[in-house]
Amino acid sequence: RPMARSVPEMGPESFEEVYDGEAVAGAPLIVAGPGTGFGVSTLVPSPKGWTVLAGEGGHIAYAPRTALERELAAVLARDHGYVSNELVASGSGLDEVHAALSEIRGVPCAKMTAAEMQAKADAGDGFFAELAQVRALAVMGAVGDLALANGALGGVVLAGGVSERLAAYFRLPAMRERFVARGPMSDYLARCPVRLLRNPEAPLIGAAAHYAQVHGV
C-alpha cells in the first residue's frame, strides 16, 4: 500500500517509461509489484486525495495464450493445482516454473539462483531467455487484465525486483501486444501508459504521504 501511495508524489525522474501513452485525468491507476510475491493495488483519485485499494490481484488465475503457455500451465496444474499469476511471474514460483519449462523442453533442471538464471538469459542462453519471456508475458497479461477490469486508464506502474529484472523484456513487441490485445476491447488499453518505478525510497514516501493525508498535515 505505501508503494502505491507514493506514485502521485514523485516526479518523472523516479520512473522509467515502458510504453508511452496518455493518462486519462481522474482515472484509476494500477500499481503492481511482482517480486517475491505479486502485490497489486488500485490507486483511485478523489477530491480529498488518493485512495489505495489493496487486493490480491496477483492470485488471479494465470491466463495462457500460446501453445507453450498452455503446456506450462498444464504441468504446473498437475504439480500444484491452482495456477496463479503469482506462481508464474513472481520470485516465489521461479523454481517451479523453471522445473516445468525444463520438463517441457527436455533439458536438465539444475538448482540455480534467480541471479544465475538472469545472467544466463542476459548472456544469450535461449532456454533462460525463454523462461524470462514467459514470466514477462505473465506480468503484462496480468496487469492488462487488471487495468481493463478497473478502468485504470490513468496508467500502470510496475514495481518490485522481478519487474526491474525483466525490464528489457517488457519492451519486446510481444509484451505490448499481450498488454493491449483484448479482442473487441483491444483499443481500450492502446494509449494506457506503463511505467517502471525506480525510486528505492518509494515506500517511505508513500507512508509519509498517507499519514499527511489522513492527519491533514
Image (cartoon, rainbow, N blue to C red):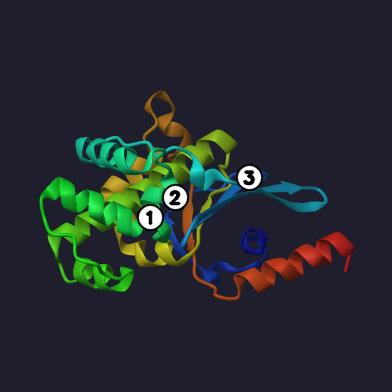
Q: Residue furthest front?
A: 79
Task: Give the number of callouts.
Answer: 3
Helix, strand or loop at label 1? It is: helix
Q: Does the CB distance between marks 2 and 3 fall below 8 Å?
A: no
The first of marks 1 and 3 along the sequence is 3
Q: Is residue 19 left or right of residue 28?
A: left
Helix, strand or loop at label 3? It is: loop
Looking at the image, residue 38 lies above or below residue 61: below
State how far apart marks 1 and 3 are (Cα). Answer: 29 Å
Where residue 17 appears, as percent x and y from the top left, is: 44, 61
**Picture quarter containing residue 153?**
top right
Residue visible at 10% across and 50% down in the picture: 106
Residue visible at 16% across and 58% down in the picture: 127
Mark 3: give few (<14), some (14-19) or many (20+) Cα within 10 Å: many
Which label was assigned to residue 86? 2
Disc 3 target residue: 28
Disc 1 target residue: 93
Mark 1: give few (<14), some (14-19) or many (20+) Cα within 10 Å: some
Identify which residue, 98 or 22, lies in the foreground. 98
Amino acid on which disc 1 is placed: Gly
Q: Is residue 77 left or right of residue 55?
A: left
Q: Is residue 23 left or right of residue 181?
A: right
State how far apart marks 2 and 3 are (Cα). Answer: 22 Å
Q: Can residue 191 be seen?
A: no
